Image (cartoon, grey):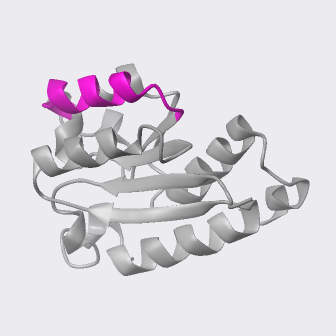
Amino acid sequence: MPPPLIAVLNGPNLNLLGLREPHLYGVDTLDDVEMLCAETAERLGLAIDFRQSNIEGELISWVQECRGRASGILINPASYSFTSIALMDALLAVSLPTVEVHLTNVHRREAFRHHSYISRAATGVISGLGSQGYALGLQALAELLGTASNDMDDDV
């Protein structure tokens, strides 16, 4: 039986990680984040489909594709968190365990970042832990899906 698939979806400007405001977002590139996710997923007995788009409609289509295909979603919607009711609606429609992740602590930033529409559709939210938030999000999804092994606790 194939491992459960987790869609790891990344929103706008995350393709610029490592270059864009490293004092806020860190020096890890999106490729580094993908490698971290792949290594973490393998240890947890998960498979991932890692994607990034600057286009809201494309992210919505990817979420919709998850229905019947993926077991869960790990999403960093970036600035769409604060603007996209359509992305929230798509996540609600697929009814999958969903973890929202943000590299920075959005609650320590500008006031407009304090309300995420995506959080309404998320099972949980991880914010402010940099790229490690992705590994923690995958661990949470593995536990929600019942695939987590006890040895992962020491690795993250």
Q: Is residue 114 visible?
A: no
Quick one: 82 or 70, which is closer to the camera? 70
Magenta extent? 82-97
> Residue 59: x and y, percent?
22, 48
Above or below for 75 versus 89: below
Q: Toward which corner of the image does residue 39 lie, by quadrant? A: bottom right
**Left or right: 129 as drawn, with respect to 51:** right
Residue at image coords 40%, 44% = 66
Quick one: 130 or 139, which is closer to the camera? 139
Residue at image coords 27%, 72% = 17
**Left or right: 123 as drawn, with respect to 19:** right
Above or below for 41 versus 146: below
> Residue 141: x and y, percent?
63, 43
Q: Is residue 142 visible?
A: yes
Is 38 covered by the magenta stretch?
no
Above or below for 119 versus 75: above
Above or below for 44 versus 111: below
Name the magenta segment's main secondary structure: helix
Residue at image coords 22%, 33% = 87
Is 93 covered by the magenta stretch?
yes
> Residue 19: x and y, percent?
21, 78
